[in-house]
Image (cartoon, helix red, strand yellow):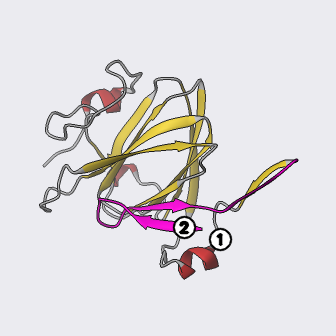
Amino acid sequence: MEVKKTSLKGVLLVKPDVFEDHRGEYVATYDVDLYRKHGIKVHFVEDDISVSSMNVLRGIHCDNKSWKLVSCMLGRFYLVIVDCDRKRKTFGKWQSFLLSERNRNQVLVPPMHGVAHLALTDKIIFHYKQSENYDPARQLTFKWDDPELKIWWPTRTPVLSQRDQTGDYVD
């Protein structure tokens, strides 16, 4: 397993080892001992998936407590992580990643960093582990095309939920 720092403080790119042979491949998506050996000591309590079709954009969502470990189980998506803490000088800084069933990359996301993804294939399965149970009362949502964030998306016409069309962040 390889762990790399990214341009966002606390956000890590994780490349699990992949064993391939004539039968296919094997990937351990999480091993607490291995992750701790690499300095990742987050205790995860919940696993979730979302399934989306081409051009669906979900996010930008975050809260003030949850760490997330994001991966792609099927297809390919454009992942954006953005610093959503207005108290930091780095507010609005973002980074994108391409996650796919082929590269098996994972991204570790700290609290107050928004997560958003755009489906680039007919069907994707977005998987994430969370360090806290989901609590809608703690959720913050920024509009996907918030002009203050200046995020580049590979589409201008995504399929969005009502929540993601309007955002609900209150200062």
Q: Is residue 65 left or right of residue 37?
A: left
| In front of the other: 26 or 119 | 26
Q: Is residue 92 left or right of residue 10?
A: left
Return the x and y of residue 79 as percentages of the image width and height: 42, 42
- Label 2 sits on a secondary structure element that is strand
Asked if 125 appears above or below 40 in the picture, the reply is above
Return the x and y of residue 67 as percentages of the image width and height: 42, 63
| In front of the other: 4 or 33 | 4
Q: Is residue 163 left or right of residue 34?
A: left
Quadrant assignment, res 76: top right
Q: Residue at x 27, y 48 (%)?
A: 94
Return the x and y of residue 70 as percentages of the image width and height: 50, 53
Which residue is labeled 1 in the image? Answer: 31
- Label 1 sits on a secondary structure element that is loop
Q: Is residue 99 magenta?
A: no
Q: Residue at x 17, y 58 (%)?
A: 90
Tell me which segment is drawn in magenta.
Answer: 1-22
Asked if 15 appears above or below 51 in the picture, the reply is below
Q: Is residue 20 magenta?
A: yes
Locate the N terminus by quadrant: bottom right
Asked if 44 appears above or below 163 in the picture, the reply is below
Q: Nearer the viewer, mark 2 or mark 1?
A: 2
Q: Residue at x 38, y 22 (%)?
A: 158
Q: CA distance from mark 2 to mark 1?
A: 13 Å
Disc 2 marks a residue whose amino acid type is Glu
Return the x and y of residue 148 as percentages of the image width and height: 13, 39
Disc 1 marks a residue whose amino acid type is Asp
| In front of the other: 154 or 130 | 154
Which residue is labeled 2 in the image? Answer: 2
- Say if mark 2 contacts mark 1, CB within 8 Å: no
Q: Earlier in the sequence, mark 2 or mark 1?
A: 2
